[in-house]
Image (spheres, rainbow, N blue to C red):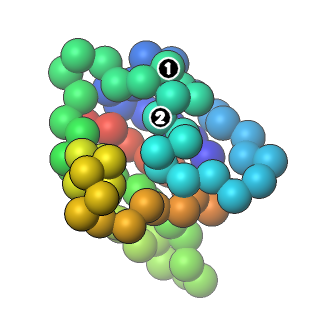
Amino acid sequence: VFVSGQVRTPGVVRLRSETSILQLIPMVGGFSEWANEKKILVIRREGSQDKRHTVNYKRIVDGKDPNFILKSGDTVIVP
């Protein structure tokens, strides 16, 4: 998974098992002080197209949205 944007240590994170967005954020050191936790963009290659998913981290933490499971090759952008 490729992680960029407003996280403490952007870069590549190798997934060894099923990993959710809630697990990924601590793996990259957490959010920076300017992060928009409500509009995380996950870009996933599906077939020949890139699909964009907007993830609201706060709603997941509050139990209002289901956790988002990442797949190998996903790009996560924290604005």
Residue 63, compared with residue 23, is above or below; it is below
- Residue under the point 24% across and 28% down: 35
| Number of the label disc, if any, that sits on residue 29 | 1
In this rendering, position of residue 75 left or right of residue 32: right
Front residue of this view, candidates 60 and 1: 60
The answer for how far apart the CA atoms under marks 2 and 1 are is: 7 Å
Which percent across, then down, holds residue 62?
25, 51
User: What residue sits 64% from the left and 34% below the top?
Assistant: 12
Q: Is residue 31 visible?
A: yes
Farthest residue to the front: give it: 63
For the residue marked with disc 2, what is the amino acid?
A: Ile
* Residue 70 percent coordinates (x, y): 57, 59
Taking depth in this image into account, of 51 and 58 the one nearest to the observer is 58
Q: Secondary structure at mark 2?
A: helix
Q: Residue furthest bottom?
A: 47
| Residue at the disc numbered 2 | 25
The amino acid on which the numbered mark 1 sits, given as a three-letter code, is: Gly
Q: Say whether residue 41 is left or right of residue 20.
A: left
Marks 2 & 1, CB-CB < 8 Å contact:
no
Name the residue: 24% across, 39% down: 37
Count of marks, rendered view? 2
User: In this orientation, which residue lies closer to the viewer: 29 or 61?
Assistant: 61
Q: Measured along the vertical axis of the image, is residue 59 above or below residue 28?
A: below
**How crowded is the residue under tag 1: few (<14 C-alpha within 10 Å), some, or many (20+)?**
few
> What SS does tag 1 mark?
loop
Q: Quadrant of residue 42?
A: bottom left
Quarter of the C terminus within the rendering: top left
Q: Position of residue 29 (x, y in %)?
A: 49, 20
